[in-house]
Image (cartoon, rainbow, N blue to C red):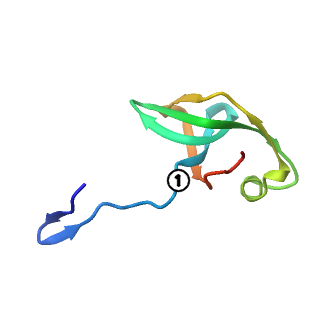
Amino acid sequence: MDNVIINGIEYAPIKSTAGTRAIIVVDRGWIFAGDVTRINGRIILKRAVHVFRWESVGFVGMIANTKKADLRPSPDVDIPEGAEIFCVPVADDWGL
C-alpha cells in the first residue's frame, strides 16, 4: 500500500517485523497456538498446538517457559471469530 496524505499529513502503512504465530484463548477454556490467518470471520491456525495444561506458573509464565506446559500437536484449527477471548503474539517457533 502506498502512503496517503490527509489534511497535509503523510501516513505510511505499518510494517510489522513480527510473524503471525499467536496463542488464541477461545471461549469455554480452549487454548491453541499457531500461525494465524484471519479470513471471512474465521481464525485459521496452521502448525497448531493445543495448550492442554500448565503447572506451577501463571499464564504469562507458561508463555515464557513452555517446559512447564503440556503442549499437544493439533491438526489445523478453524475457530469462529466471535469465539476468541484474546490473542497473544508469540515467537514464530513457539510450542514447536
> Residue placed at 15% from the left, 65% from the top?
5
Q: Nearer the viewer, residue 48 or 69?
A: 48
Instruction: Mark 1: give few (<14), some (14-19) or many (20+) Cα within 10 Å.
Output: few
Q: Quadrant of the C terminus?
A: top right
Find residue 83 and report its image quarter.
top right
Where residue 43 sits: x, y (%)? 50, 34
Identify the residue at the far right of this view. 56
Residue 32: give x, y in percent of width and height. 66, 38
Q: Amino acid at mark 1?
A: Gly
**Location of residue 64 with respect to 50 vertically, above or below:** below
Residue 77 position (above or below residue 85): above
Q: Nearer the viewer, residue 56 or 39?
A: 39
The percent coordinates of residue 50 (x first, y second) are 71, 36
**Where the N terminus falls, by quadrant?**
bottom left
Question: How many labels were placed on the picture?
Answer: 1
Please, is residue 15 above or below residue 76 in the view?
below
Q: Residue at x 72, y 47 (%)?
A: 95
Residue at 45% over, 37% down = 38
Residue on which disc 1 sits: 19
Classify mark 1: helix, strand or loop.
loop
